[in-house]
Amino acid sequence: MKLPTLKKLPVANQRVILRTNYDVPLRDDGRVADETRIEESLPTINYLLLKKAKIIIITHLDRPGGKPVPGLSLKLVRERLKIMLPKVKIYFSGKVLGEKTKRLQTNLKPGQVLLLENLRFDPGEEANDQKFGQDLASLADFYINDAFANSHRKHASMVTLPSLLPSGLGFDCQKEVETLTKLRNQPKRPVVVILGGVKESKIKAARKLTAWADSILVGGQLTKFKGLPKLLGHQKIMGSLTKSGEDITLKTAEKFKKVIGKAKTIIWSGPLGAYEEKKYERGTKMIAKAMAESSAFKVVGGGDTEAALTKFGLVEKIDYISSGGGAMLEFLAEGTLPGMEALKGGKND
C-alpha cells in the first residue's frame, strides 16, 4: 500500500500537527507506568526538530467519555517528554482548543513543541465532528499520523483532520504498515491467530480473519460475547473457558499448544485469561511458553499481551511487537485502516 510519508513533505520551519499514541498505562499514583509508546514517537519528533518545525502534538489517554477527567490529563505525559527531550522547550495547553491553545500556537518558535490536552476530553473527537477537525486543522500546515494503534478508529483526529492538510505517516506508523503489509501478503503457513482480551470488536476481526488464517485460537472474555459461540463452530476456530470464566481450560490449552507447534506464523492479540492473578495465569502462561519455544515468525499486538509476556519473561522471544492489537488485526484482515485511507485524501500536491 503506497502512502505519503513524512520524509516526502516540506515540513522545515512549518507548523506540524503530530498525532501520536500516548495512551500509556498509569500507576495508582497517576505516574506513567510504561513509557514505550512515548519512546516510539521520538524518531519522528527528533526528525521534525531537526527540520526546525513547530510541533503540535495531539493524542488521547484512556476513555474519559468526552469530558475532562483530571486523572487522565496529559500533564503526566508532558513531564516524561521533558525528561526525554531535555533541550527542547515543551509547552502544554490544558484545553484541546481555545484562546490559550491559539496563543501558545501563535508564539511557538521553530524547534519547539506544544502538547495539547487529551483529545477525548472533547466529545468532537470520538464523534468525528467536522467542526472539531477543522478547528484542529487551523493550527497547522501539515499533519503526521504516528498513531497506528488508533488508526482503526474513525475519530476526528484520525480521518477528518488528515483530509484537510497535506499529510503523511510518521516513522513508527510507517514501520507498522510496512511490516504488517509484508506479513499479510507473504505469510509463512500455517498461520495461527490467537485472540483474547475483553474487546468485542475482535469478534468481527475473527470473522474476517477466517479467510486469511489457518487456525484461530480464542480465549479471554471473547468467548462470552454474542456472536462468538456460532463462530466457535467454524472449522478454523476453537476455544473454551473454565467455569469461572477467568481462564481457558487445561484441555483447551493443550489443544492450542499442538496447533502452535505446527505454526510457521503466529499472531497474538489479547491475554487468554486474567493473567494478572496467579490463580488464573496458567492458560496464558502455557500458550506464551509454547509461542516462545516455536520457530515460527511471532507477532504480538496490544499492551496487555506485551505486559503478559513481560511478566513471564518471554517478550524478548517475539519477532515483532505491534503497538495496537485491534488495529493490527483489522489491518491484517483488510489490508488498510480508516486512518490510512484518510491520508490518501490529504491535500498532498
Image (cartoon, rainbow, N blue to C red):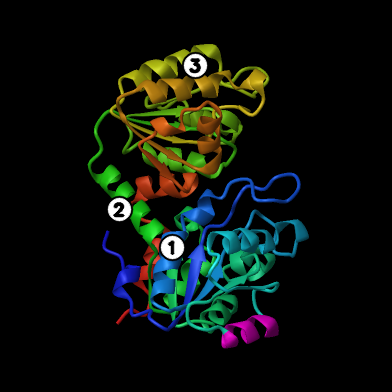
Q: Is there CB contact under 8 Å for labels 3 and 1?
A: no
The location of residue 284, given as percent across then percent down, is 53, 24
| Residues shaded magenta | 98-107
Above or below, comparing residue 122 to residue 334 in the picture: below
Above or below, comparing residue 32 to residue 189 in the picture: below
Main structural element of the magenta stretch: helix, strand or loop?
helix
Task: Identify residue for label 2.
Answer: 178
Residue at the (32%, 67%) spot, across then down: 5
Q: Nearer the viewer, residue 211 or 170?
A: 170
Task: Identify residue for label 3.
Answer: 252
N-terminal-most mark, 3 or 2: 2
Please tell me how crowded label 3 is: few (under 14), some (14-19), or many (20+) other residues with Cα within 10 Å. some
Kindly state the secondary structure of the residue where label 3 is placed: helix
Which mark identifies residue 297?
none
The location of residue 82, given as percent across then percent down, is 59, 64
Q: Nearer the viewer, residue 50 or 187?
A: 50
Please tell me whether mark 3 or mark 2 is closer to you in this view: 2
